Image: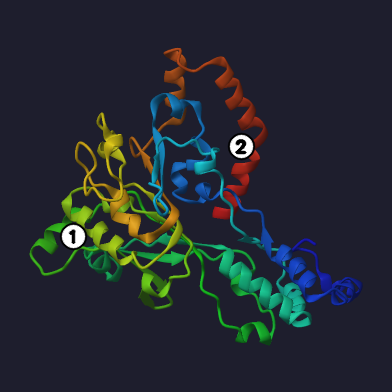
Amino acid sequence: MDSTTAPSSNPDILDRLALLPVELQYQVLFELLTESSPCVMSLFVPDWGVCTHAADPVNSIYDLQRIDVYTRGTGFVRGKFETRVRHHDDAGGHVVFPLARQTTPNSSGAPIAELGRRFPDAMRRALRDLERHGLHCFEQLWPRGPDDEIGKCMAGGALVYRERRGGMAGSLDAGPTTVRAAVPLPRHLMFNSFPRDPWRDVRLRRNALTSFRFEMRLLVERGPELLAVLWSAMKQLESVYLDLRAYGRGKVSEDSVRLGATAMECLRLRSLVIAGLRSGDRYERPAGWQLCDWETDEAEVGGGVNWVKVFCGAVREGGRLVFVDRRMLDISWEGWRMRAEKEGLLSPEAEVAVVIGESENAAAYMRHVEKVLS
């Protein structure tokens, strides 16, 4: 059943649906409310195109973008650190979440509302599971000036977000039973941020003259209010995606991230994915870096913060810490591909694979990603 089809215009469909058990009604409605999701790594830090470029042979040659995965140990089994994980491998494979179906200007919510009134129990369960198991995406809000409300929050290290609400579920009238139902707590959150903060140095200089503590905090816009994300009230979370590129470099930023990570130690996540902590001049690792004791050493071999140790407390035993980073902020993949061809480093087989992959899969896939992000 398509979301643009008006089921109320064909009472036979609704009558047949009414004969089904609630379990089957729920499955039908859940399929109606949702659509296939792109890989979550296409939605996370979308300007990086992590999913698209992770398996690119050019990336294998020049190590431009890296996915590191630390799997926390269980019992007497030590944790495992894997670097330069190929995205199609088991350690860093594609992950999808149910996504609210996108409406179009010509579509109407009336048929969905009719389904909610006719099948309130099944609709309530479908909406509950979409809210609970779906991915809730938040985008950072930018201040109009250093001293507006958002700018003042950022002066203390906070980032302010607004939830991206798409599809039918956000404004669905599914009948009085659903309206009265308690909204379930989400299990999967994603926070996408800006890569640069042009006023960061101004804020740091100001804080040096005040008693403000620079601390990584997340605030979410809810109407006229800014509500703090309290991790202690969200222990049901299973996966969190954090874009921390905005925190920049230096001890002040590192200390602020440490404080934020401490507040997350009440969580027991299956997966915590973080972007930007080792990007830029922090990307390279010295010889012998593998000797680090990831869950106990404060610094990595050769210096630099051991971010595994910092965030490990937020992940359950057997859970995964995933770090996504780039050698440089802006990458011209076509330019690097031309360089690889000029240097004779790109094999004909790899070039053919890229062309075939792009012609058969990438175009349709990216259209779907653009639809989701629009």
Question: In front here: 181 or 194?
Answer: 181
Across and down, in percent, residue 355 comes to 61, 25
Q: Quadrant of residue 89?
A: top right
For disc 2, the neighbor class at 10 Å (few under 14, some 14 to 19, many from 20) is: some
Q: At numbered mark 1, what does the secondary structure look like: helix, strand or loop?
A: helix
Q: Residue 203 — which label?
A: 1
Question: In front here: 335 or 19?
Answer: 19
Residue at image location 34% in from the left, 55% down from the top:
312
* Mark 2, residue position: 362
Residue furthest to the right in view is 12
Q: Is residue 110 above or below residue 36?
A: below
Q: Is residue 306 above or below residue 262?
A: above
Residue at image location 38% in from the left, 62% down from the top:
141
Q: Quadrant of residue 179?
A: bottom right
- Evaluate whether residue 109 shows in this view: yes
Q: Quadrant of residue 180?
A: bottom right
